[in-house]
Structure formats: structure tokens, C-alpha cells
Image (cartoon, rainbow, N blue to C red):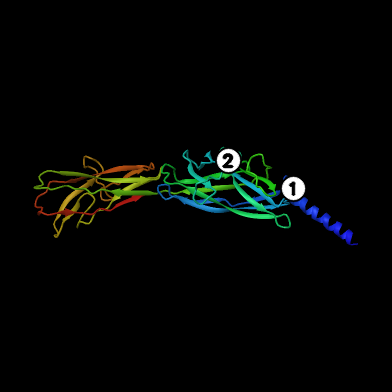
């Protein structure tokens, strides 16, 4: 009676050892992940955009205590694993990348590309031969990318762009390689929406020291405009702060007094077309952004006039850009 019991226990122990010792049996694993959304992106800014998420791996029918799972991402939108891109309706792509680490130094690559940089995951089976693990991906977009036009961009990862290689082991994990048994693939999409934006700066216009104003006095300023590529815009100037000013007859006011000095701002060097808000005989300056900074010259002129009291005259103009 006791001898039969001992033989039965030994047989069970041998079966358990064989179950854990196998290293080349097929293991059924699946991957679950959501689409990667960068959201609205301003390509003129210098602040990078990051988005993080999870990749969940579930394995069943594990015939070894451990399994090495190697997750691979290709580069479906063009470019390379080191510089992935999304495509849109225009020729210029939107660059981004997917990384294995939060410091964005290790791209998430593939066992089928050179250099091979897949994401390795260690799975440990429970008593039912099942295991679950979650790893992070780190999406990152360097900016500016000023020549990218506004619109929708995406990179679609099909089953041809993802892969999972799985191999069981007992103690020493195998290195990820394309020779490992291949499991299932999965799909996801990377998306971003590039929004229109414009930035402007302006220089002052200094007419200098003037004595008797017996002839016209000219001075110029500049408005620097940076707008997203393909973005149409219009620059308007208000009437300023001088009493009774109009787009065609602006007023500088003397510091400490109420006296004014008439002057004008123009879009042309001949001082014929008043630059204003489009009303009162004036026009706005219109153009289209290229993603790089463009200079718009503001031509100023003080016409001949008498009776101006000595002093410092000034006016403040508000520049408005509409796009």
C-alpha cells in the first residue's frame, strides 16, 4: 500500500518537471493596445509633444515557467524606425517616433529591421499556464516642424507592420531575434491634427529729430510674421491713440500736452496706399504663410506742416493678424 503511494507521487513529480522543462512548444499570446493620439499640434512652437500609453500582452498555454515575448513596430508612414512620419494631404510629412523609455532615447523597433530594437517582455506563467504583462510606449514629436501644413495626419500600422515573437525558457531568457517563433500581429493607428497658427512682432518707427517740417519726413518699420505653411492671413493696423485719427490721417500726441502731429502709415514705398483696417480708404496687407518668418515693411511719412510745438510726439498702433 505504501509502496504504491510512493510510486504514484514520483510519477506526478516527474510529470511536473517535464511540464516546466519544455522550451520550444507553441505559446498562444495576444496583444491589446489603443490608437495613439497626439491631438492638435502647433508645428510653430518649440515645445515637443509627448503621448504615452499601454501595450498589454496576455499568454496562455505556456509550457514553460517563463517566456520571452518580443514586440516589434515597423514604420508604415515612411521614414525609418529612427525617424517615423505620418502622412497627410500634402507632400510634407509630420515626423514623430515611438520609444521604449520615457527619456525618448531608445526607439521601439523590430526584429526584422537593422538595428533590431524590439521591446522585450518577460512573461511568468501562473499555475494555469497563463501570464499577463503591461508595458508602456512613449510617443514623442519634436517641434518646430514649421513647413508642415495644417490638416490631419496619420500612420496606419497594419499586421504587416507589427509582429510578436515568443519563445519559452526555463532560466536564461533568449535574445530577441527573427528566428524565434512568430505569434500574432495586431493593428493600431497614430494620428495628429496640425492646426493653423501665426506669430507676429513689430519694430518701432522713429522719425528722429525734426526741425521745421517743410518737406515730407520718412521712416520705416517692420512687422515680422510667421504663419503655418499655406495659411492665408491679413495684417491690419488700427487708428492709434491720437485724437481724431483716421487711417489716412494719423496723429502723434506731444508728451505732456495735447498738440498733435499728423503722419501716415503705408503699404507702399511711394506713400500712396494707406495701411489700416480696410475702412476709411485704407487697406490691409494680405499674404500666405510659408512656415518661415516673413518681413512686412511699414512705410511711415510725416507730411509738411506748420505750427508744431517742440517736444516728443508719439502714438501707439495695434497690429492685428487675421487667419
Tell me the crowding category of disc 2: few under 14, some 14 to 19, or many 20 or more residues within 10 angstroms, Cα based: some
Farthest front residue in view: 3
Asked whether residue 255 appears in the rendered view, the answer is yes
* Residue 52: x %, y % from top left: 53, 53
Left or right: 252 with respect to 141? left
Total labels drawn: 2
> Marks 2 and 1: which is nearer the front?
1
Task: Check disc 1 and report the residue beneath it.
Answer: 22
Report the residue at 67% width, 42% height from top.
180
Q: Mark 2 = which residue?
A: 116
Q: Please, what secondary structure does the residue beneath circle 1 have?
A: loop
Report x, y in % for residue 164.
Answer: 64, 45
Residue situated furthest bottom in the rendering? 1
Residue 100: percent from left, percent from top: 55, 48
Q: Secondary structure at mark 2?
A: loop
Q: In this view of the protein, which residue sits in the foreground, 145 or 274?
A: 145
Amino acid at each position: 500500500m505504501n509502496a504504491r503511494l510512493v510510486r504514484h507521487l514520483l510519477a506526478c513529480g516527474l510529470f511536473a518537471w517535464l511540464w516546466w522543462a519544455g522550451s520550444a512548444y507553441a505559446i498562444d499570446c495576444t496583444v491589446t493596445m489603443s490608437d495613439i493620439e497626439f491631438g492638435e499640434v502647433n508645428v510653430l512652437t518649440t515645445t515637443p509633444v509627448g503621448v504615452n500609453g499601454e501595450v498589454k500582452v496576455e499568454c496562455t498555454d505556456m509550457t514553460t515557467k517563463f517566456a520571452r515575448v518580443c514586440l516589434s513596430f515597423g514604420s508604415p508612414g515612411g521614414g525609418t524606425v529612427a525617424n517615423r512620419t505620418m502622412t497627410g494631404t500634402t507632400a510634407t510629412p509630420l515626423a514623430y517616433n515611438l520609444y521604449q523609455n520615457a527619456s525618448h532615447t531608445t526607439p521601439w523597433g523590430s526584429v526584422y529591421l537593422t538595428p533590431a530594437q524590439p521591446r522585450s517582455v518577460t512573461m511568468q506563467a501562473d499555475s494555469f499556464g497563463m501570464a499577463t504583462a503591461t508595458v508602456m510606449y512613449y510617443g514623442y514629436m519634436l517641434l518646430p516642424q514649421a513647413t508642415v501644413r495644417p490638416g490631419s495626419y496619420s500612420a496606419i500600422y497594419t499586421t504587416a507592420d507589427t509582429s510578436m515573437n515568443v519563445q519559452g525558457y526555463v532560466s536564461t531568457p533568449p535574445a530577441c531575434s527573427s528566428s524565434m517563433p512568430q505569434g500574432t500581429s495586431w493593428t493600431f493607428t497614430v494620428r495628429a491634427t496640425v492646426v493653423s497658427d501665426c506669430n507676429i512682432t513689430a519694430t518701432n518707427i522713429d522719425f528722429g529729430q525734426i526741425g521745421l517740417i517743410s518737406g515730407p519726413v520718412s521712416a520705416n518699420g517692420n512687422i515680422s510674421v510667421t504663419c503655418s505653411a499655406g495659411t492665408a492671413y491679413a495684417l491690419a493696423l488700427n487708428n492709434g491713440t491720437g485724437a481724431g485719427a483716421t487711417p489716412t490721417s494719423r496723429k502723434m500726441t506731444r508728451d505732456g500736452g495735447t498738440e498733435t502731429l499728423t503722419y501716415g502709415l503705408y503699404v507702399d514705398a511711394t506713400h500712396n496706399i494707406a495701411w489700416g483696417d480696410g475702412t476709411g480708404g485704407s487697406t490691409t496687407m494680405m499674404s500666405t504663410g510659408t512656415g518661415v518668418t516673413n518681413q512686412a515693411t511699414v512705410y511711415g511719412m510725416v507730411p509738411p506742416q506748420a505750427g508744431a510745438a517742440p517736444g516728443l510726439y508719439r502714438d501707439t498702433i495695434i497690429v492685428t493678424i487675421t487667419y
